[in-house]
Image: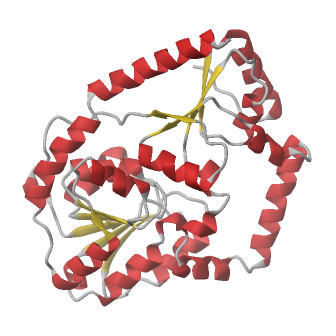
Amino acid sequence: MLHYSSSKASINEILKICNDKAEIVVMHGLDLGKAYICNRLNGNVLVLWRFFGSELYVRNKMDFYSTKTKLILSKNSRGLLSVLTKGMNKLRLMMKWGLQYKKELGNARPHFILCTSEEEHRFLIHNYKSIPELIILPFSPISNKLPPKECKENHIIVGNSRSPFNNHADIIEIISHADFRKKYKYIFPLSYGKDLSYSTSILSSFPKDLDIISLNDFVPKTDYYHMFQRAKMLVINSYRQHAVGNILMAISMGAIVYLNDRNPIYHFLIRNQIQVFSITDFQKHLATECIPDIQTILENNYKKLALITSLDAQYRFQVTISEKYVMFRKGH
């Protein structure tokens, strides 16, 4: 494995290797550096774009923020430091890529996009221009054993990071007014994401009489795993596909998962007969304590999840890549 920095010189080295030796190039995400490479690859190189999310969703991020999230961000962005930081970031981009740096992303044309679901691909086509043809990206296989049901505790995981895409404030308001709110311990994973002021605002708005765990630093993978094993619920209030790994891990460990019904992954899971719930359901369940039976959900969801994370799905993906490559070469 070779490792390169993000300098312009290193990126040109990568480009040379790709043009000299590669037949297929996979872009994990599509930032400026990768778009620069994509725009300069030889025409006989098949380019696959492993869609990450931020490369498109950041363009119109306000569309994915709730009213409460926008209010928090508006208050945090008024300071002089915030204005100066944004200005310096733009200046760095211009110094590195030139005045036409914005056109690099706009001109990038991968041949295929790798997404985890048809639902997300349709979502992208509806919201953005020039989205390539879809190749379904398989999920990693899950464990072949059900987690022990007795390990569940009254823990609710809220969000997956300090990203405003989580729209934490709306969930906090639901919790604040719920009749049975004191029965639970609330876990906020806030160990990564750029906006520290946002996470500070979120924590300061949480009711002081409730039990909260704020994960501000990275924890070992085993500890994170056990956190999901113990959790009874996971709530992700994102309007876009987001935190898929956390969602699938929660499902495989028997947690009740609540997602915003605008989120493509919500509809993908429903289509595959995996039982997940909406944010409205979360509000009702926490207010009435009419929580669905975890064991019934666990057994159903584990079986359905095993189907979409099977080795067969991995094999189909490999066959599809081979077929697309053969068709691409015939066209050249």
Residue at horizontal 12 percent and vertical 61 percent from the top: 294
x then y, percent, for residue 7: 78, 35
Tell whether 275 sits left or right of 172.
Answer: left
Q: Quadrant of the C terminus?
A: top right
Tell whether 297 sits left or right of 326.
Answer: left
The count of marks equals: 0
x then y, percent, for residue 198: 57, 73
Residue at horizontal 27 percent and vertical 56 percent from the top: 227
Residue 226 visible: no
On screen, residue 259 above or below 325: below
Tell whether 135 sits left or right of 41.
Answer: left
On screen, residue 24 above or below 30: above
Quadrant of res 182: bottom left
Residue 303 visible: yes
Q: Quadrant of the N terminus?
A: top right
In depth, the one of 324 and 72 nearer the eye is 324
Quadrant of res 15: top right
x then y, percent, for residue 86: 78, 64
Tell whether 1 sits left or right of 20.
Answer: left
Report the colour scheme: secondary structure
x then y, percent, for residue 179: 22, 89
In depth, the one of 305 and 206 nearer the eye is 305
Residue at horizontal 13 percent and vertical 68 percent from the top: 292
On screen, residue 245 above or below 306: below
Quadrant of res 228: bottom left
